[in-house]
Amino acid sequence: MTTRIKELRAKDNLTQIELAQKVGVRRETIVFLEKGKYNPSLKLAYDISKVFNMKIEEVFIME
């Protein structure tokens, strides 16, 4: 799975820490998600997508 999190954060001028705080996880979780080393729970994927006002499948791409 790949994500557009880094791209979307840059567009919205959000740091990893700010995004992590908005969705209730540690910054390291965002780092792992951006590197494709962690698959989020459905709730976390939903929460991140909600921050960017996008659908889950627009943020997380299944390969």
Image: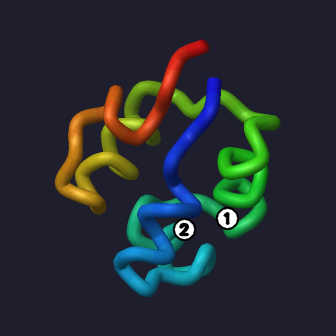
Q: Secondary structure at mark 1?
A: loop
In the visual, does 11 lie left or right of 28? left
Q: Between residues 39 and 23, which one lies in front from this camera angle?
A: 39
The x, y position of residue 2, in whole percent, is 62, 33
The residue that appears at 34% across and 27% down in the rendered structure is 57
In the visual, does 16 lie left or right of 7? right
Kind of residue at disc 1: Arg
Colour mapping:
rainbow
Q: Can you tell which mark lies on residue 53?
A: none
Mark 2: few/some/many CA within 10 Å (<14, 14-19, 20+): some
* Outermost residue toward the left in this view: 53
The residue that label 1 is drawn on is 26
Asked if the residue at tag 2 contacts the one at tag 1, i.e. Cβ–Cβ closer than 8 Å, the answer is yes
The x, y position of residue 40, in whole percent, is 57, 33
The x, y position of residue 25, in whole percent, is 58, 59
**Mark earlier in primary sequence (1, 2):** 2
In the visual, does 58 lie left or right of 55? right
- Dividing the image into 4 quarters, which one contains the N terminus? top right
Mark 1: few/some/many CA within 10 Å (<14, 14-19, 20+): some
Q: Quadrant of residue 43?
A: top left
Q: Secondary structure at mark 2?
A: helix
Number of callouts: 2
The residue that appears at 52% across and 55% down in the rendered structure is 5
The residue that appears at 40% across and 70% down in the rendered structure is 22
The residue that appears at 51% across and 62% down in the rendered structure is 7
- Compared to residue 3, the image places residue 32 above or below, namely below
Q: Between residues 31 and 9, which one lies in front from this camera angle?
A: 9
Q: CA distance from mark 1 to mark 2?
A: 6 Å
Kind of residue at disc 2: Ala
The residue that label 2 is drawn on is 20
